[in-house]
């Protein structure tokens, strides 16, 4: 069963969850603010996703802006970025959908369509 990591007040997360339901994908919900991903989880998801680590940052979030991360990330190691992401769920881009080797970050319907067709068949 897929793991859907989201923030209940996020309109994109709500849209993604509605879409998952319409596609018949079974999932469990994990609230990102209350149950922030660990450094180990983030490292594993980053590896499986094949995405740049920057895609895991919520670049439009208030905390990201307050911490001036736009200017700081380039000078940080991957380990430091993972450590920082693990400190607060509001720094992490959402929603995240994890199922086995499939990791989707942020909701882009076309991207999710390709991957969730496989998930729904399981």
Image (cartoon, rainbow, N blue to C red):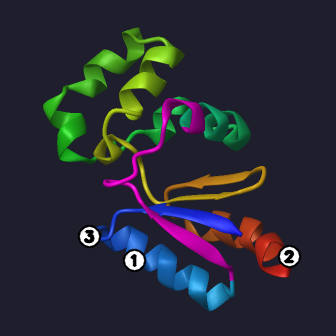
Residues at circles 3 and 1 in contact by the CB criterion of under 8 Å: no
- Circle 3 SS class: loop
Q: Which mark is residue 35?
A: none
Q: Which residues are magenta?
A: 25-41
Indicate whether residue 3 is drawn in magenta: no
| Residue 82 versus residue 22 in the image, above or below | above
80 vs 121: above or below: above
Left or right: 28, with 36 as reference point = right
Q: Which residue is mark 3?
A: 9
Compare marks 2 and 1 and give the one earlier in the sequence: 1
Q: CA distance from mark 2 to mark 3?
A: 30 Å
Give percent across and percent down for residue 111.
Answer: 66, 63
**Distance between mark 2 and mark 1 Cα atoms:** 23 Å
Circle nearer the N terminus (3, 1): 3
User: Which residue of the protein is positioned furthest toward the left in this rendering?
Assistant: 66
Percent x, y of residue 3: 60, 63
Residue at the image position 41 percent from the left and 34 percent from the top: 86
Outermost residue to the front? 35
Residue positioned 31% across, 67% down in the render = 10
Quadrant the C terminus occupies: bottom right
Q: Picture coordinates of residue 45 (x, y %)?
A: 63, 41
Instruction: For label 1, count other residues whose C-alpha is less than 10 Å away and answer few (under 14), some (14-19) or many (20+).
Output: some
Up the image or down, 48 lies above or below 114; here it is above
Q: Which residue is mark 1?
A: 14
């Amino acid at each position: 069963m897929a793991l859907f990591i989201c923030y209940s007040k996020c309109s994109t997360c709500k849209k993604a969850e509605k879409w998952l339901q319409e596609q018949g994908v079974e999932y469990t919900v994990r609230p990102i603010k209350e149950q922030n991903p660990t450094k180990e989880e983030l490292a594993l998801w980053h590896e499986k996703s094949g995405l740049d680590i920057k895609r895991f940052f919520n670049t439009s979030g208030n905390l990201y802006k307050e911490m001036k991360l736009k200017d700081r990330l380039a000078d940080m190691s991957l380990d430091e970025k993972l450590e920082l992401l693990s400190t607060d769920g509001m720094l992490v881009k959402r929603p995240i959908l994890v199922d086995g080797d499939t990791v989707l970050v942020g909701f882009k319907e076309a991207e999710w369509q390709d991957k969730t067709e496989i998930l729904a068949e399981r």
